Image: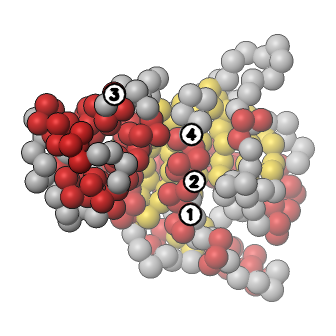
């Protein structure tokens, strides 16, 4: 569906794309090809599409996957999807908010069926990209991979390396569960309405086991979040301010692990954070 057709659809329904729902529709057919290629779909895959919109991507994905679960929160757009796909046995339609949806019930093979591989494809609303990411990562054992359109700035933070301003808690959180690959960047004119920022297509391939071994995941993520909360402070001062371990234990940890306490959080890689969290857990 091109830009004029989308414009005409909303005019006919006396409404406009909803900014609060992040409704920016992809109008470049070449971008659909890039998404499809990145997804590496087969007839053994079940695809969960978040934000199915007017069904352009849904239609393409359905031709390459075993099953598509198309989720759309907007009732008007969901009704459009119903008119297109209701009689297609390979498509399941859900009028639901992804953040409120219980995913476990969707990530199950039916009784007596051949095992399926679950993949996610989504053009994410920019305002809720991070909470959706964390929700998907929480199902890393069930989901094989995700191909996600998001704000370029967020994608750059996810793939950043230690030492730069983009590197942070989100980088480490995603890296712990998945391998992230930046597939492509897209300028605003690839969408209607055009967003005010550039976009990026990111692929997350879930790891069979986390990248680093940690003895307490909750403590590991607490250390990471606390360290980056005041990222301009020295690591020692940032963690002391967090008040979750005695100062003397922290000093011993730095000394035994060979981590200089004056370093900043952005200079530590994921392995160093894991070593620090494991030491604090044991002591």
Of mark 3 and mark 1, the one earlier in the sequence is: 1
SS of the residue under disc 2: helix
Residue named by callout 2: 132
The Cα atoms of the two marked residues, 4 and 3, are separated by 25 Å
Image quadrant where residue 199 sits? bottom left
Residue named by callout 4: 138
Which mark's residue is nearer the viewer, 3 or 2? 3
SS of the residue under disc 1: helix
Residue 199 in the image: above or below residue 246: below
Where in the figure is residue 121, as x and y percent of width and height?
58, 46
The way the protein has been coloured in the rendering is secondary structure
Residue named by callout 3: 282
- In the picture provided, is 99 more to the left or to the right than 251? right
Is the residue marked by circle 2 packed among few (<14), some (14-19), or many (20+) residues within 10 Å? some
The Cα atoms of the two marked residues, 1 and 2, are separated by 6 Å
SS of the residue under disc 3: helix
Frontmost residue, 136 versus 148:
136
Which mark's residue is nearer the viewer, 1 or 4? 4
């Amino acid at each position: 569906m091109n830009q004029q057709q989308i414009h005409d659809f909303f005019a006919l329904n006396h409404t406009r794309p909803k900014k609060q729902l992040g409704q920016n529709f992809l109008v470049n057919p070449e971008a659909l090809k890039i998404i499809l290629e990145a997804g590496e779909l087969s007839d053994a895959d079940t695809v969960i599409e978040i934000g199915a919109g007017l069904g352009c991507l849904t239609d393409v994905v359905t031709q390459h996957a075993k099953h598509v679960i198309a989720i759309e929160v907007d009732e008007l757009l969901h009704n459009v999807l119903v008119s297109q796909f209701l009689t297609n046995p390979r498509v399941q339609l859900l009028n639901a908010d992804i953040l409120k949806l219980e995913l476990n019930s969707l990530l199950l093979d039916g009784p007596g069926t051949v095992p399926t591989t679950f993949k996610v494809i989504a053009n994410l609303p920019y305002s809720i990209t991070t909470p959706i990411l964390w929700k998907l990562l929480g199902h890393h054992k069930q989901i094989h991979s995700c191909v996600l359109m998001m704000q370029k700035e967020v994608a750059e933070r996810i793939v950043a390396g230690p030492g730069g301003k983009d590197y942070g808690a989100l980088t480490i959180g995603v890296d712990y569960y998945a391998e992230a690959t930046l597939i492509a960047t897209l300028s605003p004119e690839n969408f209607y309405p055009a967003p005010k920022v550039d976009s990026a297509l990111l692929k997350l391939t879930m790891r069979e086991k986390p990248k680093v071994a940690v003895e307490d995941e909750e403590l590991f993520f607490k250390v990471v979040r606390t360290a980056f909360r005041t990222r301009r402070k020295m690591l020692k001062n940032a963690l002391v301010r967090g008040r979750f371990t005695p100062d003397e234990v922290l000093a011993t940890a730095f000394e035994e692990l060979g981590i200089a306490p004056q370093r900043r959080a952005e200079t530590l890689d994921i392995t160093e954070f894991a070593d620090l969290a494991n030491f604090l857990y044991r002591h």
